[in-house]
Amino acid sequence: MSGVGAPPWTWPRDELVIDVVHKGIYSLATGAVADATISALPTSSAGRARRARRLKGFS
């Protein structure tokens, strides 16, 4: 601990809820930006799904 702030388990519930919600929104936004800007490798299954190529007999 750095001594700068109180540990999270001592925070009031309303501040803890705000912090957790903020971190959830931040993580979803960061993931969406990363997914939009970084393309999948040609050998990954995500890359194949985007190009809609499928092997016969597999869905």
Image (spheres, helix red, strand yellow):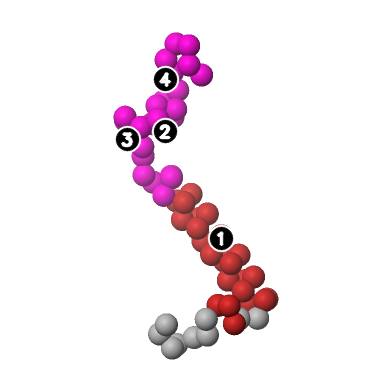
Of labels 1 and 2, earlier in sequence is 1
Query: Which residue bears the numbered disc 2?
Result: 46
Q: Amino acid at mark 4?
A: Arg
Of labels 2 and 4, earlier in sequence is 2
The segment highlighted magenta reads 34-59
Label 4 neighbour load within 10 Å: few <14, some 14-19, many 20+: few
Label 3 neighbour load within 10 Å: few <14, some 14-19, many 20+: few
Query: Which residue bears the numbered disc 1?
Result: 24
Query: Which residue bears the numbered disc 4?
Result: 53
Q: Identify the secondary structure beneath mark 2.
A: helix
Of labels 4 and 3, earlier in sequence is 3
Residue at image location 45% in from the left, 23% down from the top: 52
The answer to whether residue 28 is above or below residue 42 is below
Mark sitting on residue 41: 3
Residue 35 x, y percent position in the rendering:
43, 45
Q: Amino acid at mark 3?
A: Leu
